[in-house]
Amino acid sequence: MNCQKSGAISCSREQLMSFLYGMQRIRLVEERIGELVASREVRTPCHLSIGQEAIPVGVCAALNEDDTVWGGHRSHGHYLAKGGDLNAMMAEIFGKATGCARGRGGSMHLVAPAQGIFGTVPLVAATIPLAVGAALSGKLRGTHQVAVAFFGDGATDEGHFHESLNLAALYRLPVLFVCENNLYSTHLTLKERRVKDNIVESAALHGLAGVTVDGNDVTAVYQAAQQAVHRARIGEGPTLLECRTYRWRGHVGPAADLEVGADRRRELDEWQRHDPIAQCRALLSTRGVSSDSVDSVAAKVREEIEAAVRFARQSPDPDESELLQHVYAARRGC
Ligand SMILES: Cc1ncc(C[n+]2csc(CCOP(=O)(O)OP(=O)(O)O)c2C)c(N)n1
Ligand SMILES: [Mg+2]
């Protein structure tokens, strides 16, 4: 695999600390969600992205506040990295009225328009064309906004993916297609679904830039995303960014799916040795940051998470009278 190199050298200590904070926050939030699901206090299906945190953090660090992001079923990390409110996400996962989707969607329907998060939707590949639409809108309005579609390797098996790449390339739209290639679509490995391990080659076929990057190296993801965002803003069009990674937990739920496939245990051991957070910590120690100050990041995040859980527990359930509201667009003049 020909991966773009690490961007560690060009990252400042402050940037690395902020990457560590972002990744640590996603991991600890998801570990807590996993506990809440396991204890059945929370009943939403949850798809955890533990192990993949460097991708949302690296990509969103390259974006402006008014750039838009679109996600799928495994999107807690995208929502948090783009600035979505943790209390509103936790309340959504609890199905409460204060949730970001008013408690109607749960873990797989996160939204925060003010932060540019226009929707995470569990229909595989469904938000890829929506990101293309957002990019077209930005281009027509001359806003220089960039749209990012986050999706898995499984989504590249869908026609939407190819149609979207083609249209975005044809119109040179300011969009980043970020494929989080964790080598699995539910319990099917990449090898069981494709003759070749060549997702990135779809870019050349459709006439756009394509880059493969180590998705567990936050500095490499950031650098590749920065370059792609720059190209998009100056009118050079879209980029497909294939980020190679691995999910540590099961397809759905907090368990590890160790019974899935003969290679799962070995692969997991291998990828856990390539932990994005441990790598960032190691980099920080070479820059003279003590492990105490790094540990204090996690302590602060844990307090924030417990406050969000309290907020969600204390929030009201949605009122029954609202059940049919926000389902269909209201007709004007009626
Ligand atoms: C259109 C559609 N087909 C099938 C499913 C069932 N499904 C849910 S998640 C998933 C796997 C997606 O894999 P990938 O895109 O690689 O994302 P990952 O789960 O690995 O993050 C499938 C097939 C779905 N939700 N939508
Ligand atoms: Mg996948």
Image (cartoon, rainbow, N blue to C red):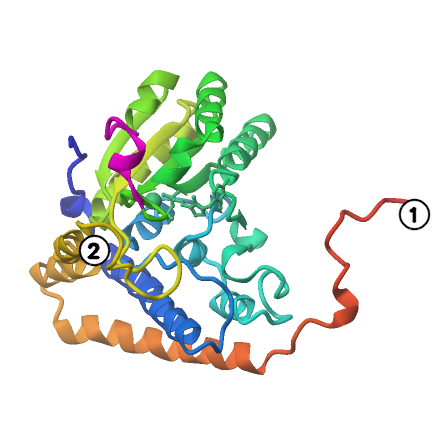
Residue at 41% x, 43% y: name it. 150
Amino acid at circle 2: Pro
Q: What x and y, as percent, mark residue 169?
A: 44, 20
Quadrant for residue 331, please give it. Answer: top right
Name which of mark 1 and mark 2 comes first in the sequence: 2
Give yes or no for residue 314 being in the magenta stretch: no
For residue 207, say whether it is visible. no
Marker disc for residue 288: none
Residue at 41% x, 29% y: name it. 232
73 and 264: which is toward the camera: 264
Amino acid at circle 1: Cys
Instruction: Give the quarter of the figure containing the N terminus.
Output: top left
Q: Mark 1 and 2 residues: CB-CB less than 8 Å, in contact?
A: no
Crowd rating for badge 2 (residues with CA inside 10 Å; few <14, some 14–19, many 20+): many
Q: Specify the segment rendered in magenta.
A: 188-199
Q: Which residue is mark 1?
A: 334
Give the distance between the C-alpha atoms of the residues marked 1 and 2, in whole angstroms: 54 Å
Is the residue indicated by label 1 positioned so its CB lies within 8 Å of ligand 1?
no
Give yes or no for residue 198 being in the magenta stretch: yes
Q: What x and y, as percent, mark residue 176?
A: 40, 34
155 and 229: which is toward the camera: 155
Q: Is residue 149 left or right of residue 222?
A: right
Above-or-below relation of 235 to 293: above
Is the residue indicated by label 2 positioned so its CB lies within 8 Å of ligand 1?
no
Quadrant for residue 64, please give it. Answer: top left
Q: Give the SS element for disc 2.
A: helix
Q: Which residue is mark 2?
A: 276
Residue at 16% x, 58% y: name it. 272
Q: Give the SS element for disc 1.
A: loop
Q: What x and y, as percent, mark residue 192?
A: 28, 36
